[in-house]
Amino acid sequence: MSAGVTRTTLRTMTQIPSPADELRLLDTELRQLDARRAVLLTRRAWLVHALQAAAPVRTASPAPGSRRPETTAPGVQNALLLLGGILLAVAAIAFTLVGWGHLGITGRSLVLGAVTLAALGAPVPLLRRGLRSTAETLAGTGLVLTVLDAYALYAVALPGTDGVGYAALASAVLAAVWAAYGLALGAPLRAAGPGARPSLRLPLPAAVVAAQLPLLLWAVAASAGAYAVTAALLVTAALDTALALRVPVRSVRAVAAVGAYGLGGWGTFAAGWLSWTAAGPSAAARAAALLLLAASVALTAAWGAPKPGLGTNTATGIATAGGLTGVVAFGGLLRTSLPDAWTVPGHLACAIALLAVAGAGLPAPVRRGIALASGCVGALAVAWALPVVVITLLGPVGRAGSVWSGAPSDARDAVTNNLPWPADAVTAPLVLALVAAVLVVAVRAAAWRPYAVAGALTLAWATVFVLPATLELPYAAALSVHGLTTAALLGYARRTGPRLTALVLAPLTSLSLAFLALASESATLTVLAALTALFAAASLRPGLGPVAAPAALGYASALACAAGASLGLQPQHTALLVLVVPVVAALLAARTEDVPTTVSIEITGALAGLLAVALAVAEPALLATVLALCGLIAAGTAVREDRRAVGHAAAALFVLASWVRLASWGVGSPEAYTLPVTVPALLLGAFRRRSDSSVSSWTAYAPGLTVTLVPSMFAAWGDGHWPRPLLLGAAALAVTLLGARHRLQAPLVVGGTVLVLDALHELAPYIVQVVDALPRWTPPALAGLLLLALGATYEQRIRDARRVREVLGRMD
């Protein structure tokens, strides 16, 4: 062994066995594997047997290509049973109606009795064997046969009795028999739990269906009248409600609930119609009794929530319906006892009383339902009074077409302005005031309180607003009330309440007041002056400036117009009075620190300036003065650091003023209009380039040059004399030379273009003569030569580029 082999290497080396030893090792391993395989096979066989014994029987999956069944076995069973029951019922009906006359009285009785007993008795053994579906089918057939038995009894034994009365008695007997039959066969009156024995489900719901008819048919048979029929409907609905609340069986509850909703709704509508058409207190009292019965049924049903069959939301809805029904009941009594104008206030009073009764002792769904009912009545009452508010608000607008036509006789005449006044609207202010008071007192939740206060403020405003016209107060009283309302709203807007509501209602009221004052000259001047002062004072209060300041300026503008008309001034002279408003607006905007107020003042001042311009349009000379004054106001505004952009508007106004002045003088030369613009524009351009060398000549000089040169060029082309083209050419040449001297692109291009066009104008007659002397083929030939020359030049450039590319390609 080599001396370099270490002891560690020797320990890790494996000795290779001899062939005999290796064969013995392989045989040993194979015997161990066979033994292990036998143990595993035995365990596998035991596990397979255990799984086969414990697993449920599974339906073998269909082989590929085989059809799967389209329905289940229970579905086929139910379909067969249903068809069988229908066929048996049809056969029984046919036997009763058609084959009845072929048998004697004994045979008829025996056949029907035997078949009925057989059909009703068959479910007993079927239920014991667990065949519930078959039992239900035969039970249903038996129930149908009992109806046929009742018909047969009427047709044979009692043919002379009243059919409707007999039907009422028969339906009551059938309801009792079916209920007893269902209970006898184990139908549960409580919810069936696990392990309960099979029972019939059909007889009890069928008994509830039959129980819907007796009272109604009895009332019809007795010819008791509309009140008795309505009472029968409501009593039946009350019984259905009791069943829906007390019996927890789902099928019975469902049928009873349908009956309660259907018959109860029908009866309530009929009772409401009887109350509405009642001619006297006696009829109204009977209708009210029926309505109170319906309301008590509804409130009782809502009181039972949350019980089986009624959810919280459903209970709230039922309570709402009950509350509305109660209001209609008492309101109908008041309607027949009071004048027509008090019908809506009477119903509203009932709703308020109902809301007061709904105390803390009632369940939450009932309280919510009663509150909703009261709210619905209040909303309907406000909707009834809304036309009065709209006429009072918008009616004075019609005074704009008949300004200073004379003071009206009273406030209603001033407001309506030939519009029809709603009938029986004398109680509209009372209705609005009551709803406002309810909102303030009843709504206490923090989430809804701000909305309630805003609504109450709006309704209180509407109450005061319509009061003068409703009471037919004098015209001066109406003006005073509306003015005081405006002042009160502005005062209320200073508080931390519904400020937005007050800020909306105050200008709205003032606008209506301003239109209302147009009927009289003195009223117009007084009201506009008062509104101007009122809003000007309000604008000094924090938070009121964005609304009050522009309103004051607007009314000041209207006051200026009214004052001019009162003094007999022409509209163009009145424009000078209106210009006082933009001056004041500019001064106020410069001293106001609140940004929204500043913006609103400036917008109002600009609108007043436009009004002055519109008034002065008829007199060009005075219009120029007005435009110049507006430009002066805009220039004064542009002095402020944050209003530099207004300077452009000021320049435009000055230019317009000069143009209007020139037009009023009859000046037709365009240079008189353009040169006053060009000179300042060029001076400003030169000043700007001197202060900022990066400004291009196009920005600095192109606008000023084009303002004069372009209109003069068009005028020169239409001028047949020589002075204008000569002067225009000289000016264009001077501009071109100045551009070349100072290397300015804009003067060079603009001046050169105008110079060339002016020269063409001078050469145009000679060019026309030359063109007339040439043959007609000369222009196309010249154009073709030009195109050929351009094409040759283009080809030469391409060839030169190709040569350069070849030379570069040969370079190493």
Image (cartoon, grey):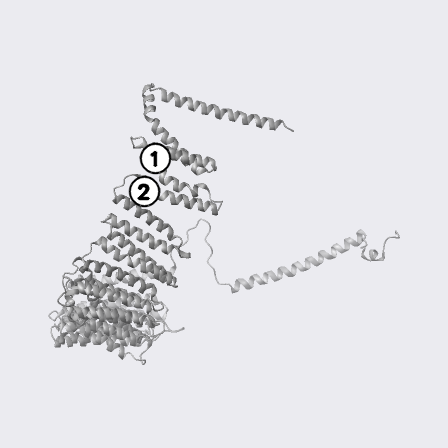
What amino acid is found at the position of numbered circle 1 in the picture? Met
Q: Residues within 10 Å of mark 1 (few under 14, many from 20)?
A: many
Mark 2 or mark 1, earlier in chain: 2
In-image side of 289 versus 23 (left or right)? left
Q: Nearer the viewer, residue 607 or 134?
A: 607
Residue 713 disc label: 1
**Residue at (19%, 76%) from the top-left corner?**
330
Q: Given this view, does label 2 or label 1 mark the residue nearer the observer?
A: 2
Image position, residue 804 (x, y; %)? 57, 27
Image position, residue 11 (x, y; %)? 82, 58
Q: Nearer the viewer, residue 68 or 664?
A: 664
Residue 673 disc label: 2
Q: Could you tell me if residue 524 is visible in this image? A: yes
Query: Helix or strand or loop: what does disc 2 sit on?
Result: helix
Q: Nearer the viewer, residue 43 or 468?
A: 468
Q: Could you tell me if residue 269 is visible in this image? A: no
What amino acid is found at the position of numbered circle 2 in the picture? Tyr
Using the numbered discs, state the Cα–Cα distance from disc 2 to disc 1 in whole angstroms: 14 Å
Quarter of the image for residue 496 reads bottom left
Q: Residue furthest bottom?
A: 361
Q: Is residue 411 above or below residue 618?
A: below
